Image (cartoon, rainbow, N blue to C red):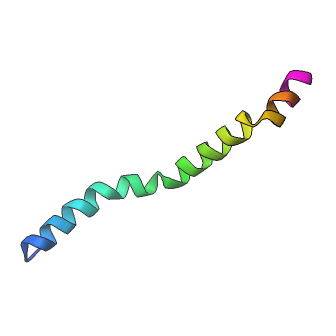
Amino acid sequence: MCDSEAEKILFILNKHERPYRLLIPVYIFSYSIMDFTCSPDCILVFLYS
């Protein structure tokens, strides 16, 4: 499967990095939701509605 030591190391790193790369859209979405809900305008709208 892997010939050299460098290829083995890259294979292991890619294997462990893959789940984190899949979560990037989740992080962006949750950050945008938190940014929206924590903005002062939205807090005022929620308070006065």
The number of callouts visible is 0
**Image position of 11 (left or right of 20):** left
The image quadrant of residue 14 is: bottom left
Segment colored magenta: 45-49
Residue 1, visible in the rendered structure = no
The image quadrant of residue 8 is: bottom left
**Image position of 16 (left or right of 4):** right
The percent position of residue 26, horizontal first and vertical second, equals 54, 48
Magenta-span inclusion, residue 46: yes
Please give the name of the residue rendered at 86% of the width and 22% of the height, measured from the top-left corner: 47
Above or below for 43 versus 34: above
Residue 34, visible in the rendered structure = yes
Please give the name of the residue rendered at 39% of the width and 52% of the height, measured from the top-left corner: 20
Please give the name of the residue rendered at 84% of the width and 26% of the height, measured from the top-left corner: 46
Q: Considering depth in this image, is 2 or 27 the residue closer to the camera?
A: 27
In the rendered image, the quadrant that contains the N terminus is bottom left
